[in-house]
Image: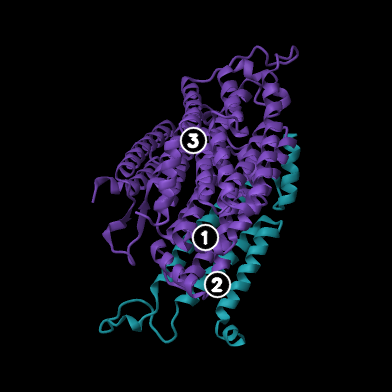
Chain colours: A purple, B cyan
Amino acid sequence: MALAHNIPFISIMITILAAVTSLLADKNRAARLCIGALTVVAFLSAILFAYLWQTGTSFTFSMGHFPAPWGNELQAGLFEALMALTFTVVMILSLVAGRERVVADIAPSRQGMYYLLCSLLTCSLLALIYTNDIFTAYVFVEINTLAACGIVAAKDTGETITATIRYLVMSLLGSGLILIAVSLLYAITGHLLMNDLLSSMTELAASGDYAMPCMVIMLFLAIGLAIKSALFPFHTWLPSAHGSATAASSAILSGIVLKGYIILLLKIFYRVFGLSFARDLRVADLLFVFGLLGMIMGSVFAVREKNLKHMLAYSSVAQVGYIFMGIGLSTDIGMVAACFHILAHAITKPLLFLAADGLMDVSGHSKNIFNMQGAARRNILAGIAFTIGALSMIGIPMFSGFVSKFYFVQGSFQNPDKMLVTLIVLALSTVLNAMYYLPVLVTLYLSNDEQSPHRHRQSANSRNYQSVMIIFILLNFILGMFYEPVIKALEQGLLMLGGAH
Amino acid sequence: MEFHLFTNYVEIAAVILFSVGFTTLLFHQNLMKKIIGFNIMDTAIFLFLAAKGYIAGRMAPILVEGANDPALYINPVPSALVLTGIVVSVSVTAFALALVLRLYERYGTLHLDEILYLTRGEHD
């Protein structure tokens, strides 16, 4: 067995150890420990990706080398490695750029705990990406929920605590549905490992037994995970939670935490039910409809919003709609487009949230767009970063958002039944995106208001913040211009996820 | 069909309890009752799992000397799942109670609508 096969397990262990040991450290050491551990994990994930890319294989890692029915398993292919790499990198960048805001927003005694939660959050995301056992996935879904609620509540204002409790209640409804679905799955098949579940499900699909329970299980799993990833109409908790938290938390939650659950849903599609059986159960059609509605409604809510962070949060609802629409298309290219959009949104939305933070910094910390007139002139780098993020979300060529839209359109051509409605909603959603991002850009670049008390304020962002902004901008360009290898990796990764070695 | 309903009465009870808990968690405005609803929901799932793992007339899955035949024991996996589930449920409940306590200290009410109204007043 190659040494690289240990990387998924070691990555999860490093993050969990970093979380535990940061209890012993003071707040600055905890931050360094968390970011250091994440850097090691990012490096290891890059090695794993390179190894899998070269060998073109995927592998199953038995925990403790116990054979299949008794031991727990991890599974890694190109898809998993690429997601793990992206998530860790986005996590590091968000934490580095949001460092000053964390110091300002969170009580000094709690800052150590904040980084503990961030390590734990990465740990649970990595476990969701790599796990091959559906009950382990449930446990890490809960850990993820608690850690995500924790980094919202860390700011400790009335607004964030209320947002957290709403987030927690919605998440618990989702967890309940997931747990009952897992129990039903175990009751029918007697398995918890995804490989065994897949063979049982293939038998059930062939014989036609338990058709109704299988559909209910798939529905519960899909709805449970859709609540947690804020698919319209289950998005009600998202704007207040993402809009009120500290900048790093907003970036992490919108950029990667929502996607962790979508990846688990994809694994359930591919590795538990098998893609063809999952499509026969028609649950994908439901997700398709919700996704289309989300693309429109998320943008409509965003147009009406005057609070910049809430607007970005509603934009996340629309973008999650795109991803579910791609999954619901039930075509191979649609699936690749959805996965590409996971990556594109993971590097664009943190950029927007962090840039918005820089812009609010030079506008007296007001979140209201009207108070931010000329902010992009006062903080030039944040202005450029926000512009690039907005253009990417609208779908201007050269940026990552365009590539995913391009592939969504191609994916819809493969499915004639859904083609027309997809194209219309895509066009409408693009117009709506432009309708709320462009006025904000205009306001940001207007000349300074003479009466504004902030007109002489200069940005005082640290070197770290500035370098992260530049890295995010470059990543956006790279993903927008040189997308072909990424698409190829996702195509192969999805094949591996479906069982081809 | 009625036959199955009568033999699987524990599962029926579990599903009813699950729905009670789920709707309480979703619709009740009182935060404490929401948490109670969550606990009913999770306990219902544990009941379901425990019922699925039990095989009539067999022993608890603890090895007794001289009885090495696995057919003498019930399935231990659902019990392990229930234990893990209880751990998760307890930690979530603790976290939710801590949040509710914080909100009650700040706003003096457990009613979610009132709290939302009060926070809106704070930020406009």
Dot label at residue A211: 2
Label 2 vs label 3: CA separation? Answer: 50 Å
Label 3 lies in what chain? A
Instruction: Please tell me which residue is depicted at 39% across the width and 52% down the height of the picture.
Output: A496
Asked if marks 1 and 3 touch (Cβ < 8 Å), the reply is: no
Q: Amino acid at mark 2?
A: Ala
Dot label at residue B89: 1
Image check: A281 left or right of B77? right
Work out whether disc 2 and disc 3 sit on a shared chain.
Answer: yes
Label 1 CA crowd tier, 10 Å (few <14, some 14–19, many 20+): some
Vertical arrangement, residue A111 with respect to residue A414, above or below: above
Q: Secondary structure at mark 3?
A: helix
Q: Can residue A119 be seen? A: no
Q: Secondary structure at mark 1?
A: helix
Residue A37 occupies which quadrant of the picture? top left
Label 1 vs label 2: CA separation? Answer: 31 Å
Label 1 lies in what chain? B
Q: Position of residue A21 (x, y in %)?
A: 37, 42
Dot label at residue A342: none
Instruction: Please tell me which residue is depicted at 70% across the width and 14% down the height of the picture.
Output: A448
Q: Amino acid at mark 1?
A: Ser
Q: Amino acid at mark 3?
A: Gln
Q: Nearer the viewer, residue A256 or A285?
A: A285
Q: Which residue carries the number 3 mark?
A: A111
Q: Nearer the viewer, residue A71 or A76?
A: A76
Label 1 vs label 3: CA separation? Answer: 26 Å
Image check: A167 left or right of B81? right
Q: Position of residue A421 (x, y in %)?
A: 68, 48
Label 3 CA crowd tier, 10 Å (few <14, some 14–19, many 20+): many
Q: Earlier in the sequence, mark 2 or mark 3?
A: 3
